[in-house]
């Protein structure tokens, strides 16, 4: 199946799911746009997203999930991909007193903001410009790579690259994104309340662009590496995907499944 025909609900997605899907851009996709008006609108969208994440205690949830992936490591090495405003990294540092966090983003402006803010002076933080689809680092540089609320911005070919690169550069890759179901459009009024029209616009598109577990399994099958993938639902409405290059025990004693083993 060609990527332009690949449904985000997965190869077996029903007709209504394909109608639900959209290819419209979000405002935050223009964060590095040369037009200052579009770039400012994108920054406004990021600020609104941050308010929503704080209100929903999302950073605490993401930190807990990432540290669970690291297991009992005394000084886990964690890479945050697509870090945005860096608040997940701050939460990780609060939650684990000896963790070392590499805070990265593809946006040079975002990384410059990390370097000039509190993270830039933290002794356990490294800041880097990193493209999640082409990570410039040796194999297994990190224990865990975490990529939150960003996967839906990527095209299928890029998702394959993230799965391949993330499981190469880190022992485990943790992906967290919105759970794909039209019922979650019910949160759009809350987004409007917390972030205005920009947040409501981007949130609606994010929900409609989210990948389903079956879509991620299909992409893992075809990513060019022996990636083992385990997907699960996490309250209040997250897709949590754990990926690695070899069969390992997942946190809590659950065996990792290969991409061929469907768990959705």
Image (spheres, rainbow, N blue to C red):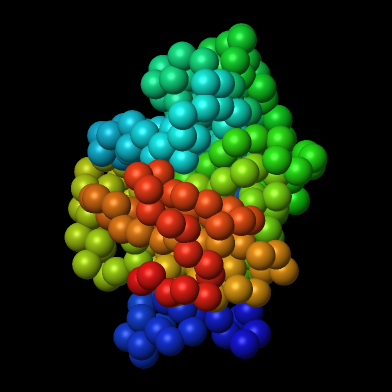
Q: Nearer the viewer, residue 75 or 212?
A: 75
Q: Nearer the viewer, residue 117 or 101?
A: 101
Q: Residue furthest bottom?
A: 15
Who's the residue at 47% across and 73% down the image?
Answer: 261
Q: Position of residue 197 (x, y in %)?
A: 33, 50
Residue 179 sits in which quadrant?
A: bottom left
Question: Is 128 located above or below residue 230 in the figure?
Answer: above
Who's the residue at 66% across and 22% down the image?
Answer: 126
Q: Nearer the viewer, residue 258 or 79?
A: 258
- Residue 159 falls left or right of residue 233: right
Q: Nearer the viewer, residue 264 or 157?
A: 264
Q: Position of residue 121 (x, y in %)?
A: 61, 9
Q: Position of residue 3 (x, y in %)?
A: 63, 79
Question: Is 220 located above or below residue 58 in the figure?
Answer: below
Who's the residue at 60% across and 28% down the image?
Answer: 77
Q: How many marks?
A: 0
Q: Position of residue 56 (x, y in %)?
A: 26, 38
Question: Is 168 located above or below residue 118 in the figure?
Answer: below
Q: Tell me if residue 178 can be seen.
A: no
- Residue 4 falls left or right of residue 97: right
Q: Quadrant of the C terminus?
A: bottom left
- Residue 18 falls left or right of residue 77: left
Residue 145 sits in which quadrant?
A: top right
Q: Tell me if residue 73 can be seen.
A: yes
């Amino acid at each position: 199946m060609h990527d332009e025909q690949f449904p985000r609900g997965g190869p077996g997605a029903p007709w209504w799911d394909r109608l639900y899907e959209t290819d419209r851009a979000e405002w935050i996709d223009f964060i590095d746009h040369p037009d200052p008006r579009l770039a400012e609108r994108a920054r406004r969208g990021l600020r609104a997203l941050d308010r929503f994440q704080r209100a929903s205690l999302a950073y605490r949830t993401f930190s807990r999930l990432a540290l669970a992936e690291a297991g009992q490591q005394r000084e886990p090495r964690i890479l945050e991909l697509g870090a945005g405003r860096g608040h997940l990294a701050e939460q990780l540092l609060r939650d684990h007193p000896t963790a070392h966090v590499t805070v990265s983003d593809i946006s040079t402006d975002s990384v410059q903001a990390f370097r000039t803010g509190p993270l830039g002076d933290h002794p356990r933080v490294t800041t880097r410009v990193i493209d999640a689809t082409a990570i410039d680092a040796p194999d297994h540089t990190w224990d865990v790579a975490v990529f939150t609320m960003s996967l839906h911005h990527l095209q299928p070919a890029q998702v394959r690259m993230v799965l391949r690169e993330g499981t190469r550069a880190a022992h485990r890759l943790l992906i967290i994104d919105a759970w794909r179901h039209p019922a979650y459009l019910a949160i759009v009024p809350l987004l409007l309340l917390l972030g205005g029209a920009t947040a409501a616009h981007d949130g609606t598109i994010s929900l409609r662009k989210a990948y389903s577990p079956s879509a991620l399994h299909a992409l893992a099958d075809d990513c060019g590496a022996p990636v083992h993938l385990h997907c699960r639902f996490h309250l209040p409405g997250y897709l949590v995907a754990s990926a690695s290059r070899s069969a390992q025990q997942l946190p809590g004693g659950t065996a990792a499944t290969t991409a061929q083993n469907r768990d959705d």
